[in-house]
Image: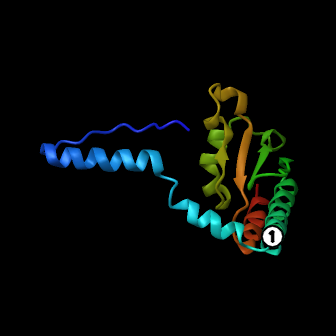
Amino acid sequence: MYEREVGWVTAPPELVAAVRSAKQFLTYVSSGPFQYAIAEALALPDTYYDAFRADLAAKRDILADGLAAAGFEVYRPQGTYFITTDITPLGEKDGLAFCRALPERCGVVAIPNQVFYDDASAGATQVRWAFCKRTEVLQEAASRLRRL
């Protein structure tokens, strides 16, 4: 993991030393508190994870089916809670412009994949949707997307 922190502090020397000490501790052991959470998670029964996986799969299917019904080319994922779609079947070519207009067009938001590319044109027609939402939110989004 790469730390990408840029910042500064202006204070009396004793406060700068305190900030530096806290920064040092946070940089190298920032995940320490999560170890307790992980230990708790590992103690959960397999049924918890089975239900969690089934819930996400059902939510994925609600959104994927809604996107397909709205005319998108849908790339159905198997290991994330994001669905990627191609917007060209809708006559669109610019994912950034498409995503900026989407809330006004139908009250739904998406992320243009081109923001994740060094060469923005490589992902220009790809749009990302999250399905880690409440079922009723996904159903409403699927209904609104049909307005496109």
For mark 1, does the 10 Å Cα neighbourhood hold few (<14), some (14 to 19), or many (20 or more) residues? Answer: some
122 horizontally vs 72: left or right: left
In the image, residue 11 sits, relative to residue 52, either above or below, namely above
12 horizontally vs 145: left or right: left
Q: Percent x, y for residue 92?
A: 75, 39
- The residue that label 1 is drawn on is 55
113 horizontally vs 26: left or right: right
Q: What count of labels does the image hold?
A: 1
Q: Quadrant of residue 130?
A: bottom right
Front residue (pair 91, 84)? 84
Q: Quadrant of residue 66?
A: bottom right
Q: Quadrant of the N terminus?
A: top right
- The residue located at (76%, 59%) in the rendering is 145
Front residue (pair 29, 57)? 29
- The residue located at (74%, 67%) in the rendering is 138
- The residue located at (66%, 59%) in the rendering is 108
Colouring used for the render: rainbow
- The residue located at (73%, 60%) in the rendering is 131
Q: Residue furthest top?
A: 119
Which kind of residue does numbered mark 1 sit on? Asp
Which element type, helix, strand or loop, lies under badge 1? helix
In the image, residue 138 sits, relative to residue 100, either above or below, namely below
Q: Percent x, y for residue 117?
A: 65, 31
Q: Quadrant of the C terminus?
A: bottom right
Q: Quadrant of residue 61?
A: bottom right
Q: Percent x, y for residue 99?
A: 64, 47
Q: Percent x, y for residue 76?
A: 85, 50
